[in-house]
Amino acid sequence: MDPLDVMMNKDNVIPFYQPIFSADKQLVVGYEVLARMQTDDGVMSLGSFFQDKSIPDEYRIELDDHIQKLALDAYMETDQSTILFFNYDASLLLKDNGETFLQRIEHYKKKGLNIEQIVLELKEDDVAEHFYDNKHFFYYVQSFGFRVALDGVGHNGSNLNLVAMLKPNIIKVDVKFMEDDDLPHLFSEVHQPLSMLSRKIGATLLFEGVSNFNQLNYAWRNGGRYYQGFYLHSPSHTFVEPYCCKKKMQKEFQYFINYERKKVESQFSLSNELTLQLKQTLKMIKPEDTYDELILKVAQDCDKYAFRVYVCDEEGFQQSSNAEKNTEKKWVLIEEGRFKNWSWRPYFLENIVRMNIEKRGFLSDLYTDIERDERIRTYSYPISDHLFLFLDIPYDYLFEQEGLL
């Protein structure tokens, strides 16, 4: 629709509210305010109007102000127990130093608005474009007391430095990247550190665009406290009943919990199998055996589990060659790995210390092996206080076992 037609028919522009649900209580904790226009052909979204940088700033500011007023009028008639999200273009905030937005909020604050329940939602890309030259302005805006949400985080890789400096109250991640119900692990690798950072800075992780079961599962597994999307509830011109999705969410969560419990049980079962096997194998190792002789014996006994075996010391230096399966599925020694240091790997030294203290082996999480370019796990086991055995488990084996992927 032509921007002039939108502005000429501003009275037909109304707010819609998309519910946001919490994982802890499975109730509506907030609403994102969306602009909709009533036309002869039905209600249409005005999202493209606000995203189109070619439309004059004055038009977008005026329509934003119009939507905010209508939404706040309706919100003031509620108990204000939910939070209210307003989308804003960072460049528009900078254009008038946030005065239009701040004056609007201040006007309703005088009427009794709980300002801490208002969320200013900014897109990561927009903030990144202006933040480093205007960071004091963003801090100034935050100082007024309402919350700030950073939207679109992680879709082009996460700008963790920006997130850490801005310290938003809420971090929004869109799960629309998951096409055809896939669960691409590469996105999980991006979102896991984002989840850790959100906890460190005290931010809440919100997954939006949830349109199917798998996307909700992904959000739940990756530390999302808040969820938003058509799978839970579509936008409405009114506020909805707080517990409208409670039964559905409880049912889905129970499935997630049962599935994850089975995965943990499978991982413990594999660890126990490998521990028992290695105890038997190590009994057969002679004091005069070299490290290479040791790993070949381990490899033969653990043939169905592993494709690579090696020994490291407590400082991470590899003491043996690599025992690896070749293309004919036969074990061969590869000298190249000897004396390489692996202490730079995440959790390596932590696991060494844990093995020394707890006197047991550990199964790693899933990660991508650089040489094979496939998802694997590694089982590490203490041979002595100073030596540790490592078995790399291939994707094929993990795939065949329930709960290991």
Image (tube, rainbow, N blue to C red):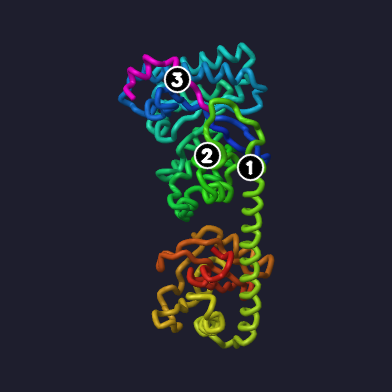
Q: Which mark is residue 102?
A: none
Q: Label 3 sits on what residue type?
A: Val
Indicate the amino acid at tag 1. Ala
Quarter of the image containing the C terminus?
bottom right
Name the residue at the front extreme. Answer: 40
Pointer 1 or 3: first along the chain: 3
Q: Is residue 2 magenta?
A: yes
Total numbered labels placed on residues in the image: 3
Extent of the magenta region: 1-17
Q: CA distance from mark 2 to mark 1?
A: 14 Å
Which disc is residue 229 wearing? 2
Q: Residue at x 58, y 14 (%)?
A: 108
Which amino acid type is marked by label 2? Gly
- In which quadrant of the rendered image does the N terminus lie? top left
Of 68 and 206, the residue lying toward us: 68
Q: Which residue is mark 3?
A: 13
Q: Quadrant of residue 158?
A: top left
Identify the disc placed on residue 23: 1
Residue at 44 percent of width and 52 percent of height? 180
Q: Residue 317 location, x and y as percent?
A: 50, 69
Question: Mark 2 near mark 1, Cβ–Cβ under 8 Å?
Answer: no
Q: Is residue 155 magenta?
A: no
First-in-chain label (3 vs 2): 3
Q: Secondary structure at mark 3?
A: strand
Q: Nearer the viewer's eye, disc 2 or disc 1?
A: 2
Q: Position of residue 341 (x, y in %)?
A: 47, 66
Identify the element where label 1 is drawn: loop
